[in-house]
Image (cartoon, grey):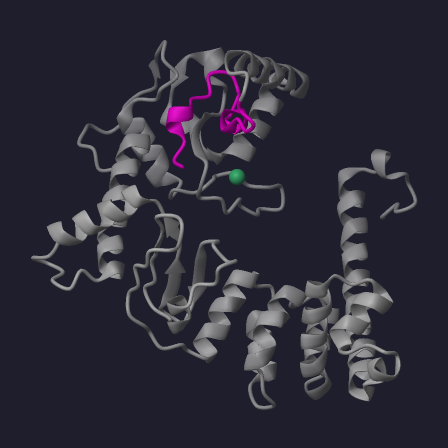
Amino acid sequence: MIDSTAPIPVMNDDDLIASTRELARKSNGVEAELLLYLGEIDARKIYRERASPSMIAFCMREFNFSEGAAAYRIHVARFARELPAILDALRSGAVHLSGLRVLVPHLNAENHQRVLAQAAGKSKREIEELAAALSPQPPAPDIVRKLPNRELVLMAQTAAAASRPSQNERRPVVAPLSADTFKIEFTASRATHDKLRRAQDLLRHRIPNGNLAQVFDKALDVLIAKVLKERFAVGRKGRRASAPITSASHEAPDPMKREVYERDEGRCAFVAEDGTRCPETGFLEIDHIDGFARTHVHDRDRSRLLCRTHNQLSAEQLYGREFMERLRQERKEAKAAARPPPSQAPEALLPTRPGACAQQQLF
Ligand SMILES: [Zn+2]
């Protein structure tokens, strides 16, 4: 039984989640209702009589929406007037507003029920891929462009859009163009540019035209194999892990690292009470279930791959939250004392459980 009347700080975890789920459900309903009303105002063009040059300007002034929020709400609301199922998908929580914003231009009377069903429960990135599959964009030539003032490179596997880089937009782009192709665009330093040219030249015998996508694909194969070997001894020759061994070093033996990584399929092995497994494949570390600081034993059957978050949770459960927080604080202070000026200390994000080893992180 949910006790949603209890004050938030003392609510138990299950009630807190259930109450939040209920709020999210209501919020979806309110958002769908809002779009219905906005669509009607827009259709009647009431904003003109209210001295606004556009529906967006009207929403900004009248409802204090940001320009972005006004634009995408109106965008979705207009399509929803033709296809009311769009609002049903929003109301039921099946497809979020960010996803609908991407999807609606690709919907029509024939396909919308099927496509909305396909988009249900998907992330925005997955919905972008779905949209790209519905309206594939043609590939375009590679582009390496020197930008004004700085030594920059824009790399594009495909897409005509890349031929006119916006002066304001310098963020990396990974955008699906069709079911199997992506546009990848980023800014690189002069040094990276020179390395790219060198790699193209070295590969001329296999990739005579220096195709960027092929050069990067080969480079990533080499990088992934190298990092897997360094972090988890994957691909390194050696015996299989045998019996558990006692060691002074927290660094697990190569065969054990490799077997744990392969057994857990390169993914965090944390499983919640309801059976859900953590999907994280980055920030992975080898976790000693019984705590290496306690046992000083490397045992593949008592080890698992955990992401940073779950490694920290596991350490808190093993050593106590207070102890871990004190340890983190001490390490943070020690780091700050060692290096006074830095505005950002990425090391502060590294795992701080006893014996945790940064070398065992994958990325
Ligand atoms: Zn995890």
Residue at the location (34% across, 68% down)?
158
Q: Quadrant of the C terminus?
A: top left
**Residue furthest out toward the bottom:** 110
Residue 86, by quadrant, is bottom right
Given residues 13 and 363, the one toward you in this image is 363
**What is the span of residues highlighted in magenta in the rendered image?**
342-363
**Residue furthest out toward the left:** 205
**Residue furthest out toward the top:** 248
**Residue furthest out toward the right:** 5
Residue at the location (41% across, 68% down)?
164
Dominant SS of magenta comes to: loop
Residue at the location (33% across, 58% down)?
155
x%, y% of residue 276? 57, 47
- Does the rendering let one see residue 96? no
Count how many numbered circles sit on residues in the image: 0
Residue 94 in the figure: left or right of residue 303: right
x%, y% of residue 224? 29, 43
As drawn, 300 above or below 165: above
As drawn, 233 above or below 318: below
x%, y% of residue 216? 26, 54
Magenta run includes residue 353: yes
Given residues 353 and 178, the one toward you in this image is 178
Magenta run includes residue 285: no
Residue 105 in the figure: left or right of residue 142: right
